Image: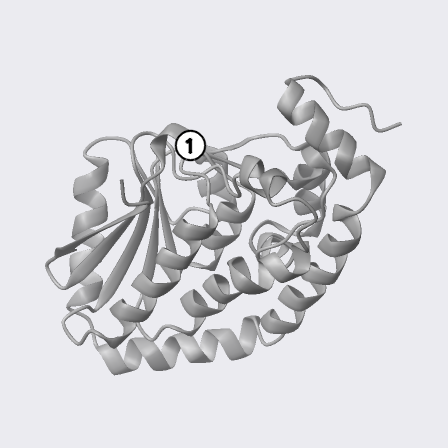
């Protein structure tokens, strides 16, 4: 079964994360397929807007922790440099609008991917979880930059420390979500994508460059630094306890 589905629609391409049995968690294959699909969309003159969503009722749980464990002594920094950092930069550097259609829970690295998108349209039942502290890791995938910009430093730190859910309505009030779809959610996503696909392409591309320069000029530097911190955290005893508690389905004992 392909880990990523692609379908064309009215000048847009819909990219669906397709590992529903694993809560659409990212493995290397899905991360690589999404990178390639974004490259293809950027180079396709028939595509004017990109939608990223998840199969079933979940957007994505983020990184598949089971895959990381199978990798043995994998370098977390190297992993980020091959997967999420290129994805985040691709989304921000694309001259075409990218929509995150957040159809359900969204956590960890997938939260960073959603935040990197130009617009986020959430289903009423969707929610966000920062996720990293639960297994004693630092934020990555640009979350340390994007989240404080959207909701403020105090809130970002609170939800990183607590790992509490940010439900759709609260996310909308804070500006994480541009719109909430309570009824006919998929129809709303398709309508917005079609409207963007009909827009002024060169102006959209120039505007995105301007926003990146004004608001995210240090994105690449932040991604690199997140990798340094994650490499350190990944070697800690706290992280080993976090992983053990995750697989044993119990509360971690960090102190």
Quarter of the figure with residue 47: bottom left
Residue 64: percent from the left, percent from the top? 52, 39
Quarter assignment of residue 78? bottom right
Pinpoint residue 55: horizontal percent, then vertical percent. 30, 37
Q: Which residue is mark 1?
A: 23
Name the residue at 62% across, 30% down. Answer: 164
Q: On screen, 250 above or below 36?
A: above
Tag count in the figure? 1
The quadrant of the rendering that contains the C terminus is top right
167, 131: nearer the viewer: 131
Q: Secondary structure at mark 1?
A: loop
Residue under the point 32% across and 70% down = 39
Q: Nearer the viewer, residue 125 or 175?
A: 125
Q: Is residue 170 above or below residue 83?
A: above
The answer to whether 58 appears left or right of 136 in the picture is left
Residue 69 drawn at (x, y percent) = 62, 38
| Crowd band around label 1 with a 10 angstrom C-alpha radius: few (<14), some (14–19), many (20+) | many
Q: Is residue 243 above or below residue 43?
A: above
Residue visible at 66% across and 19% down in the picture: 248
């Amino acid at each position: 079964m392909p880990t990523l589905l692609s379908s064309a629609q009215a000048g847009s391409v819909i990219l669906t994360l397709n590992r529903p049995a694993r809560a659409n968690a990212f493995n290397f294959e899905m991360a690589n397929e999404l990178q390639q699909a974004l490259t293809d969309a950027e180079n396709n003159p028939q595509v004017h807007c990109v939608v990223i969503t998840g199969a079933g009722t979940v957007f994505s749980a983020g990184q598949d922790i089971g895959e990381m464990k199978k990798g043995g002594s994998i370098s977390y920094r190297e992993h980020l440099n091959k997967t999420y950092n290129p994805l985040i930069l691709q989304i921000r550097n694309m001259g075409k609008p990218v929509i995150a259609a957040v159809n359900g829970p969204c956590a960890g690295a997938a939260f960073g991917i959603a935040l990197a998108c130009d617009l986020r349209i959430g289903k009423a039942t969707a929610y966000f979880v920062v996720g990293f502290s639960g297994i004693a890791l630092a934020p990555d995938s640009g979350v340390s930059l994007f989240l404080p910009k959207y909701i403020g430093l105090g809130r970002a730190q609170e939800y990183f420390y607590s790992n509490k859910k940010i439900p759709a309505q609260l996310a909308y009030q804070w500006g994480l979500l541009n719109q909430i779809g309570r009824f006919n959610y998929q129809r709303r996503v398709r309508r917005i994508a079609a409207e963007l696909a009909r827009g002024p392409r060169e102006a959209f591309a120039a505007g995105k460059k301007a926003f990146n320069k004004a608001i995210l000029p240090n994105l690449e530097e932040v991604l690199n630094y997140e990798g340094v911190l994650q490499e350190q955290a990944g070697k800690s005893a706290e992280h080993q306890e976090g992983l053990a508690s995750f697989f044993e389905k119990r509360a971690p004992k960090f102190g």
